[in-house]
Amino acid sequence: MKLGFLLSLSLSASMFAAEPLVENFIKHGKANSAGTVAYSYDASVYSPDADLKDLPIGVFDSGIGGLTVLEAILTLDAYHNDTLNPGADGRPDFENERFIYFGDQANMPYGNYSSAGKTDYLRELILKDATFLLGRRWFDPKSQTFRQDKPPVKAVVIACNTATAYGIEDIRAIFQAWKVPVKVVGVVEAGARGVQESRPAASGSIGVLATVGTCASGAYPRVIGQTLGLAGRPVPSITQQGSIALAGVIEGDPVFTQSVGDCAYDDIRALLEAHRKTANPLPLSTLVLGCTHFPLAKAELTAALTAHRMDPAFSSLIAPEVTFVDPAEWTARELFRTLASARLRRRPPPTEPDLFYLSFPNPLRKNLPLTPEGGLEKDFKYGRETGALDREDTVNAPLRRDDLPAVGRKLVEGRLPAVWKSMGSR
Ligand code: DGL
């Protein structure tokens, strides 16, 4: 176990050694320190003596799924706001904070870049997302021009599991190279902490349900192993299952015809089949919902586990009780602790509303290959190469309630009330 743990630590360190794509991005940021061009930020905001406390917190995802993480942040009440002691005090923990949300909808799904052999391009997209949050530049569809008055941020929350798996080390590397003291919190590390804190000392195996890309990265088993290992806890067998459809089905993507219940059933079955193939499988007792959308299907996943528990072919593979770990909730806690220990919590409540942005194909680029619905054409999307930082295929524009596509609107309005309220406050 020890050897495996050391191996995974060294793998994670060497996997993300400064590479041309990261070096190139760092160089681009340094060469454009006024932040007026794409993928750059205003470096003067982050001067060594700057007080960042009153800046908003940035949250990004590949699309609108990360709004589930923002909902968890907005509704968290796990600490006493005045004393910082653990426990609810009836006041939301982030009551004085302001948020900037960004969803890279035009370039999603992120979970498919690995199957297309394009993880490097995905990593560059993730760096662009984080830099957008640092910067002031955004696209105004009304005037069809770029404007420079988006507030910069004091922390970046990577709400996307796939983006955390492939990009958190790169983001930390560019921030370090740019001397930007912005805190970075990702759902995978927080989720692993959630596994550690919600599991009894000795119990069964762990299952991870995530996108195909997140599973291909191996991030969850690696980080869960590190987290349990560092806490001196045994690392049980961890089985992953990459779901191709569940996120899309939950979002109501018309490409998928299955119901959420049927899809959850198929994914649980596939997870159990994979789990069966591990050596001496202990019953599954923890299930990590390693994709932004999956907590919205908790009821269907519970029903799928119950159905399989009653099937003699699977019953020995599932513990009588399975604990769900929702990384969103643990991310919110991690964010609170991070801001508190860095003395970055804001005191006076914000007077300005939260802001939301979504990416769209760049309307100033007339030759972009687009689908009939106006999205980036699939071969183009997954065929791009890294390094073209002077080319903007997509632009980031404000997202208001009325801009949400019908299915997205239903999801936010019906299931994410705090986000819905915050989105309506401008
Ligand atoms: N937000 C992604 C995640 O949590 C799911 C959607 C996608 O593949 O882009 O992994």
Image (cartoon, rainbow, N blue to C red):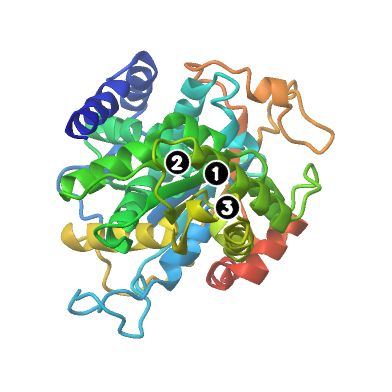
The one of 161 and 233 positioned closer to us in this rendering: 233
Mark 1 lies on residue: 271
Mark 3 lies on residue: 65
Marks 2 and 1, how far apart at CA: 7 Å
The one of 280 and 222 positioned closer to us in this rendering: 280
Residue 302 in which image quadrant: bottom right
Q: Residue at x 27, y 46 (%)?
A: 182
**Number of marks present in the image shown:** 3
Q: Residue at x 30, y 30 (%)?
A: 174
Which circle's residue, 1 or 3, is located before the other in the chain? 3
Marks 2,1: beta carbons within 8 A = yes
Q: Tag 3's secondary structure?
A: loop
Marks 1 and 3, how far apart at CA: 22 Å
**Label 2 crowding class (10 Å Cα cut-off): few <14, some 14-19, many 20+?**
many
User: Residue 32 location in percent, x, y?
Assistant: 37, 26
Which circle's residue, 2 or 3, is located before the other in the chain? 3
Which circle's residue, 2 or 1, is located before the other in the chain? 2
Give the amino acid type for the residue marked by disc 1 in the picture: Leu
Quadrant occupied by the C terminus: bottom right
Marks 1,3: beta carbons within 8 A = no
Residue 104 in which image quadrant: top right
Q: Is mark 2 within 8 Å of ligand 1?
A: no
**Label 3 crowding class (10 Å Cα cut-off): few <14, some 14-19, many 20+?**
many
138 displayed left or right of 75: right
Q: Name, please, the residue furthest toward the bottom.
A: 90
Q: Is mark 3 within 8 Å of ligand 1?
A: yes
Q: Which numbered tag is attached to residue 239? A: 2
111 displayed left or right of 375: left
